[in-house]
Amino acid sequence: MKCWVCKRQARGYGHTDLRHPVGDARRYPIDWVFCSRRCQEAFHALYGHWLRVREGRTDIKEVEMIDPSDVELAAMRKCLPAFGAAAEEIGFEKPLGAYSEAEALRVIDAIVTRYTEAMVEHHEATKYPPVRGLKELVSDPFADLEDDLPWEEKS
């Protein structure tokens, strides 16, 4: 299961919706799981704010963003070549404030596409946790066999 907030592997933190009685399947949403207390608290801050807005108990305003994780920072760094390529097509002599709407959207599309690809690459690479206790896989499964097999005659 993936963390609802950051999409990393969930590690035992969950959510129970106490509005529903015991035994009701809605009490235990199976996809509301988290990798850490930090993500769980971020979810509950967002969820609580959403409930208050929905019930009309608070004004609609922005909720503070949590600090980006190491994975997100790495994905942001991977966006730089895409940004550079898009800016190169437009021309480096043109200041960013002078971009037309189409040019700005081209740059935004390049950055967002690369960011999404980088996040997917990371999550696909970490999709399955490593199994402890197994030996490292070798590229040649017969590498540890001896050259002199007992049933072969030496010449």
Image (cartoon, rainbow, N blue to C red):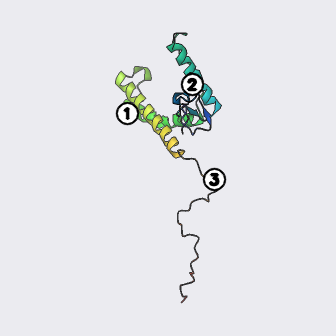
In the rendered image, the vertical position of residue 38 relative to residue 119, given as above or below: above
Along the line of sight, the residue nearer the viewer: 90 or 74: 74
Q: Secondary structure at mark 2?
A: loop
How far apart are the two marked residues, 1 and 3, measured between alpha carbons?
48 Å
Q: Nearer the viewer, residue 76 or 27?
A: 27
- Image check: 5 left or right of 83? right
Give SS at disc 3.
Answer: loop
Residue 79 in sight in this render = yes
**Which amino acid type corresponds to the residue marked 2 in the rendered image?**
Pro
Residue 11 is tagged as none
Residue marked by disc 3: 132
Q: Earlier in the sequence, mark 2 or mark 1?
A: 2
Rendering quarter of residue 42: top right
Q: What amino acid does circle 1 point to? A: Glu
Q: CA distance from mark 2 to mark 1?
A: 59 Å
Residue at which label 1 appears: 89
Question: Which is nearer the N-term, disc 3 or disc 2?
Answer: 2
| Rendering coords of residue 73 (x, y %) | 56, 34
Q: Quadrant of the N terminus?
A: top right
Q: Residue 66 appears in which quarter of the rendering? A: top right
Disc 3 marks a residue whose amino acid type is Arg
